[in-house]
Amino acid sequence: VLLVESGGGLVQAGDSLRLSCAASGRTLSGYTMGWFRQAPGKEREFVASIRWTTGFTYYSDSEKGRFSISRDNAKNSVYLQMNDLKAEDTAVYYCAAIRTPFGNIVNPGFYDTWGQGTQVTVSS
């Protein structure tokens, strides 16, 4: 499967953004999809995940309540709605996938397919 992210940009603190991750090559049934981010000089960190078949979602504690992950079966796409953005949300955001519903979803090493990333910059 090939993943392509879009929707990043430069916004002000308090604004919202919706990131998209379009998958091609196969349907995502049975997959776990994740969003991660990486700021300069920092390790890649978990943001949110969704199990495609059940729709079960899981969030990092720091983003819970502000971010929302969702999927669209017809478009074979995953989304990350980000509200009330803060300067510390500035990072490259990556979409990730693994063809199993089981595993350590917060560990980047769990996923075997990654998109190219999309930059999100939040000015304060």
Image (cartoon, helix red, strand yellow):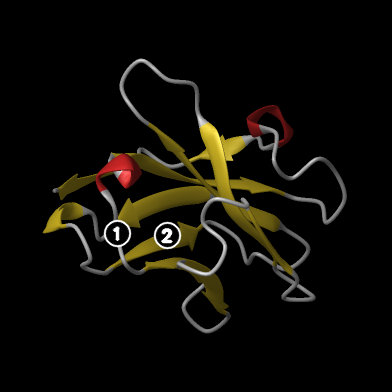
Residue type pointed to by label 2: Cys
Q: Nearer the viewer, mark 1 or mark 2?
A: 1
Residue bearing mark 2 = 21
Would residue 96 be found to the left or right of residue 54 on screen? left
Residue type pointed to by label 1: Leu
Q: Position of residue 4 (x, y in %)?
A: 37, 51
The answer to which image quadrant residue 71 occupies is bottom right
Residue ID at (35%, 15%) = 41
- Residue extending farthest to the top is 41
Residue ID at (37%, 64%) = 20
Residue ID at (57%, 62%) = 64
Crowding near the residue tagged with mark 1, few <14, some 14–19, many ≥20 C-alpha atoms within 10 Å: many
**Number of marks present in the image shown:** 2
Q: Is residue 76 above or below residue 96?
A: below
Distance Cα–Cα, label 1 vs label 2: 19 Å
Whichever of labels 1 and 2 marks the residue nearer the N terminus, that label is 2
Crowding near the residue tagged with mark 2, few <14, some 14–19, many ≥20 C-alpha atoms within 10 Å: many
Residue 107 marker = none
Would residue 105 be found to the left or right of residue 48 on screen? right
- Element type at mark 2: strand
Q: Position of residue 48 (x, y in %)?
A: 59, 55
* Nearest to the observer: residue 53 or residue 17: 17
Residue bearing mark 1 = 85
Q: Position of residue 105 (x, y in %)?
A: 74, 45
Residue ID at (69%, 27%) = 109
* Nearest to the observer: residue 110 or residue 83: 83
The answer to which image quadrant residue 16 occupies is bottom left
